[in-house]
């Protein structure tokens, strides 16, 4: 395992100090011995109980040794924390707890890559699965936040099969301008064992320096497309699609799917935003995958809980504010598939 050497060093140090700390002091256990010499040359020893001050000294020595042990355990925890940080592992705060606990038995291995397309309120987080080993797939996502020791937000899960592109990314929105953010990639294998990439950081742009001239000048509507479903079985399938915001910002991207083709087809005409879309059981469902898209991005989502031997229909949509600051909705064409 990745932390075997760390554990051996820590355990060895613990045994060493425990051994030293628990050796009784000579003064604490020494008995008062007063020899008497007889005429024939032999000695007789009279042994008396230890005086009261020696008993107190023994008690004090035990307390002192216990304090040393506690101090050693804290130093070992700090040493492990520093070594894990150097190795890109889990970051542990001053209380020796972590935002998530890494499991070094994970078959999949993941690296965090630098953020790109950083704006005043959003950024694209990137990662890569470097090895699947014996796992058939990896479920990946990002953890992020404004404290290195408290990555309190996470992105939706994306599943990557072992024969697919190992790179993945996700644009996060709703960020504060001119602030520092931290993030890391996370991957989970088919036995639900996790691996964590190193923690990276980025600084959002200062909003006051943004030039709005670059946005909403030509009023070209977003382009939305969706590809054929794949990895289909009796109760699940995967969707992929692309969105290009063109001259608009802050796109809210989501998939709609269900058994009623007419309801899927009418989403763009009947609704103006994601929150307006009314789900209707198995006939119409929705799932948001990006809350603040600027530019363009590709999306991948696995849906579960489907009925077997059933026809389904789906589309990718994006909600945004048009040139009149009114809510608007663009959706892709509809695709179909049948579960096994």
Image (tube, rainbow, N blue to C red):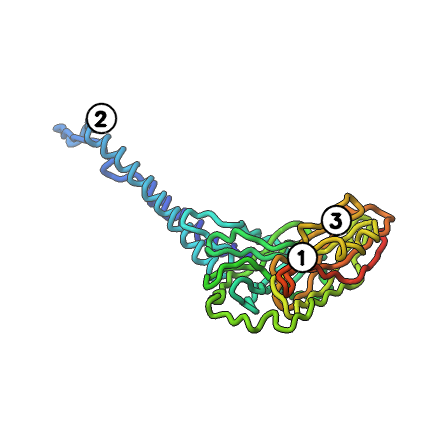
Label 2: how many Cα within 10 Å (few below 14, some 14–19, many 20+): few
Whichever of labels 1 and 3 marks the residue nearer the N terminus, that label is 1
**Residue that carries the numbered disc 3 in the rendered image:** 285
Label 3: how many Cα within 10 Å (few below 14, some 14–19, many 20+): some
Q: In this orientation, which residue lies closer to the viewer: 243 or 144?
A: 243
**Residue that carries the numbered disc 2 in the rendered image:** 49
Label 1: how many Cα within 10 Å (few below 14, some 14–19, many 20+): many
Looking at the rendered structure, the secondary structure element under dot 3 is strand
Q: In this orientation, which residue lies closer to the viewer: 263 or 15?
A: 263
Q: What residue is rendered at 66% in x and 70% in y?
A: 219
- CA distance for labels 2 and 1: 73 Å
Q: In this orientation, which residue lies closer to the viewer: 182 or 334?
A: 334
Q: Residue furthest left?
A: 39
Whichever of labels 3 and 2 marks the residue nearer the N terminus, that label is 2
Which of labels 3 and 2 is toward the front?
3
Looking at the rendered structure, the secondary structure element under dot 1 is strand
Q: What residue is rendered at 53% in x and 56% in y?
A: 144
Number of numbered labels in the structure image: 3
Q: Is residue 8 visible?
A: no
Whichever of labels 2 and 1 marks the residue nearer the N terminus, that label is 2
The x, y position of residue 166, in whole percent, is: 67, 65
The x, y position of residue 184, in whole percent, is: 54, 59
For residue 249, above or below residue 307: below
Q: In this orientation, which residue lies closer to the viewer: 63 or 210?
A: 210
- CA distance for labels 1 and 3: 19 Å
Looking at the rendered structure, the secondary structure element under dot 2 is loop
Q: Which mark is residue 158?
A: 1
Labelled pair 1, 3 in contact (Cβ < 8 Å): no
- CA distance for labels 3 and 2: 84 Å
The x, y position of residue 191, in whole percent, is: 67, 50
The x, y position of residue 46, in whole percent, is: 19, 26
Q: Is residue 46 visible?
A: yes
């Amino acid at each position: 395992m990745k932390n075997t050497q760390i554990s051996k060093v820590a355990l060895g140090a613990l045994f060493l100090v425990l051994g030293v700390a628990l050796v009784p002091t000579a003064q604490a256990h020494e008995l008062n011995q007063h020899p008497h010499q007889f005429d024939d040359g032999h000695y007789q020893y009279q042994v008396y109980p230890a005086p009261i001050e020696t008993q107190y000294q023994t008690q004090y020595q035990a307390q002192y040794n216990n304090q040393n042990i506690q101090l050693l355990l804290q130093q070992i925890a700090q040493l492990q924390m520093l070594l894990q940080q150097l190795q890109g592992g889990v970051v542990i705060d001053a209380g020796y707890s972590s935002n998530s606990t890494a499991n070094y038995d994970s078959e999949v291995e993941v690296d965090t890559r630098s953020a790109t397309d950083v704006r005043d309120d959003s950024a694209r987080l990137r990662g890569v699965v470097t090895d699947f080993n014996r796992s058939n797939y990896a479920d990946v996502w990002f953890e992020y936040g404004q404290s290195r020791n408290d990555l309190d937000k996470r992105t939706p899960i994306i599943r990557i099969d072992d024969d697919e592109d190992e790179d993945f990314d996700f644009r996060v929105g709703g960020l504060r301008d001119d602030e520092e953010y931290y993030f890391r990639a996370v991957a989970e294998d088919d036995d639900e064992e996790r691996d964590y990439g190193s923690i990276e950081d980025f600084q959002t742009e200062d909003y006051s320096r943004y030039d709005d001239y670059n946005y909403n000048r030509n009023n070209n509507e977003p382009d939305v497309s969706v590809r054929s479903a794949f990895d289909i079985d009796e109760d699940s399938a995967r969707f992929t699609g692309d969105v290009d915001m063109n001259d608009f910002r802050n796109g809210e991207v989501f998939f709609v799917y269900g058994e009623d083709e007419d309801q899927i087809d009418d989403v763009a005409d009947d609704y103006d935003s994601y929150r307006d879309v009314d789900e209707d059981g198995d006939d119409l469902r929705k799932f948001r995958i990006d809350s603040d898209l600027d530019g363009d991005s590709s999306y991948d989502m696995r849906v579960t809980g489907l009925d077997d031997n059933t026809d389904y229909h789906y589309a990718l949509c994006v909600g945004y504010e048009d040139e009149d600051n009114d809510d608007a909705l663009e959706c892709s064409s509809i695709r179909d598939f049948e579960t096994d």
